[in-house]
Image (cartoon, helix red, strand yellow):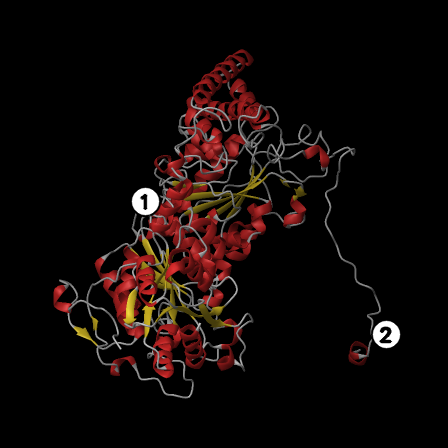
Amino acid sequence: MASARTAPPAKGLKNSRALSLRIPEPRFRPGEKADFSSLKIPEPGATPRPSIDTEPKDMRELAYGMIRVLDQDGEPRGPWNPKLDPAALKRGLKTMMLTRAYDERMYRAQRQGKTSFYMKCTGEEAVAAAAAMVLTREDMCFPTYRQQGLLIARDYPLVDMMNQVYSNAKDPMKGRQLPVMYSSKKDGFFTISGNLGTQVPQAVGWAMASAYKGDDKIAATWIGDGSTAEGDFHEAMIFASVYRAPVILNIVNNQWAISSFHGIAGGEDATFASRAVGYNLPALRVDGNDFLAVYAATEWAAERARSNLGATLIEHYTYRAEGHSTSDDPSRYRPTDEGKIWPLGDPIERLKQHLIAIGEWSDDKQQALHEELVELVRAAGRESEANGTLHAGDRPSIKTMFEDVYKDMDWRLIMQRQELGV
Amino acid sequence: MTLHAKPAAAAIPDAGTARPMNMIQAINSGLDVMLDRDPNVLTFGEDVGYFGGVFRATEGLQKKYGLNRCFDTPITEGGIIGAAIGMATYGLRPVVEIQFADYIYPGYDQIVSEAARIRYRSAGDFTAPMTIRTPYGGGIFGGQTHSQSPEALFTHVAGVVTVIPSNPYDAKGLLISAIESDDPVVIFEPKRLYNGPFEGYPDKPVTPWQKIEGNLVPDGYYTVPLGKARIVREGADVTVLAYGTMVHVAVAAATEAGVDAEVIDLRTLAPVDLDAILASVRKTGRCVIVHEATRTSGFGAELSALVQEHCFYALEAPIQRVTGWDTPYPHAFEWEYFPGPSRVAQALKQAMVG
């Protein structure tokens, strides 16, 4: 056998068998019928809930399963039911609905030419809405551009969000940032970069600082499935693991990174949650369209972090129901009905169904709340647009363009400001 | 040669006793002083903790201040800098070591896109006061991965302060200023100067800093301001703009050329001390710019542009640049690559003729 293995290759110095390169492709493309029936989705209530001090090695199966609470009838099942009172459930529902109404309005505003760019989080509202209720304002969230629900949950003024999107005279970011890249330290909402993945090691560092100071605050961060391929994600994982940082590392697996399906990020055969295993971090894989499951998983991770037991990775399994941004057209790369037949449904519909099932809600109330929120957004829109939009009305003072590059303006910026004549 | 324009130690309340130190000891002392003064200061990096750093800059600090204040990290420059940004936005003042400037690139995005812009993009809502220390430069047979001078990649970035000291006193004083600065600061430490003022003669032994007359570094707290250059050698004939290792090479070259050169140690590259440059060039009417980094788009290009923009009518001769060649740093041809005193002297003579 040894001689066979070390025998010289066949003539021409070629291996006997030609290699072939694999390029992953999604199962369905435009014009094809999407079919998710082969997805392995555990039953609601079937996943055990380990105690928060469980060793990562003793709960690895959670990285491959899926925490689900709400069943198809809207009934809560199993040990992960967070048992929220009706008022809390309604608050979560309202946050999700307001987020969607806000997204709808701002998407249209972009189409009307009032701003350059907008990004919706349609179908993923539960991810931010539930987390915002678990975390406190003193904790720090390091979000991506699809967690606007965090701000909305904290009653950050819609008008200020819109002012930012319009880069108008009252934009809190003074016209410097791309639309939707909000920042609000007082609400525990870290300045959104727009570069992907950079916030993850920063969140870990912030959490390390809290631990260093003997503080009681924790950090949470979100990253898309596609961006987990960035080095930043893995750098953050190793730091979180080595220093046992009190941080919640959320992966929002919405299946699509612009036009690339999750397989291009290596998530076809291995779950994103399973990336925690090699770092000895606990991982929870959760039905991201199930508000109760997201709440429960976040609560578990937050309690673990607050108990000085370190970081948890949570994969939120969801679906990006709309385009990546206003600059994207998903009908070019995926079947248009994919979102409609997504087997985990819509987070707003599912929480509504639950509230109805427990006798706390009705279709009429849902409709009335919807109309109230649409009107709320419309009123905020009117107020914001009076402050200006990207191409009309007042902008921030041009002079401020040169401020905040450094704490103090040095001669270069003073001279350049003079050169511009402002 | 004046080593540094230092105020008398007695004039600074916390400066303590001054004594001879090499540059590593001075940096170590700067970290020690700031760890002692400010509980929000901590330092970390590869091999920085128990071992004290491959160049020994953090020696003894973990033992003195504990694991939390001075610790080892995984080999992940992006992670080190990313985590430091998070700490800084929390309210700490992290000082991180990137073992060699050649290794800083995996962390470059975190510096350029994040640390540099967090204050601006959040309109002052968040800030990232942090210090990145990293040894740079050649002359140690480090080959292409232990010799680079990437300062121009940082001076090009709005929002970052870029600092390069040339002697122990400045290394400590600038480090303390950097730690106290509310902006992110990158300090490139000329590793060829850690032990003594290398003048660019590879065969000539370098005199240790401890034996250099006037090289006294206070034990305690003092600062050297950011953004201020220093005249190292006053002269009437030609201005030499230099920083780091090349300050000492330039002084040697002036002697070699027999030219009465005024050598300016920029100390801070961004924001550079324009007033100091203009005052000198307007006096001498001639300018030679020296750096070890590659020439094209090097910091010398910026200096040259500034001098001609502001001093065109004072110039008697074309501005000369003496730099590393536009190649990677070659291991076997280090001294052909390095812009040593004879090349600088040649440029000084050329500037006097032109």
Chain bearing tag 1 is A
Which residue does the numbered mark 1 point to in the structure image?
A216
Q: Residue at x 46, y 53 (%)?
A: B112
Q: Residue at x 58, y 51 (%)?
A: A229
Q: Which mark is residue A12?
A: 2
Residue A202 seen in the current view: yes
Depth check, front residue: B98 or A68: B98
Three-letter amino acid code at disc 2?
A: Gly
Percent coordinates x, y for residue A419 in the rendering? 40, 43
Q: Residue at x 27, y 61 (%)?
A: B176
**Looking at the image, is A262 positioned above or below residue B167?**
above
Q: Residue furthest right?
A: A11
Number of on-image labels:
2
Three-letter amino acid code at disc 1?
A: Asp
Q: Residue at x 40, y 26 (%)?
A: A157
Label 2 sits on a secondary structure element that is loop
Upstream in sequence: badge 1 or badge 2: 2
* Quadrant that contains the N terminus of chain A: bottom right
Near mark 1 (Cα within 10 A), the count class, few <14, some 14-19 or many ≥20, is some
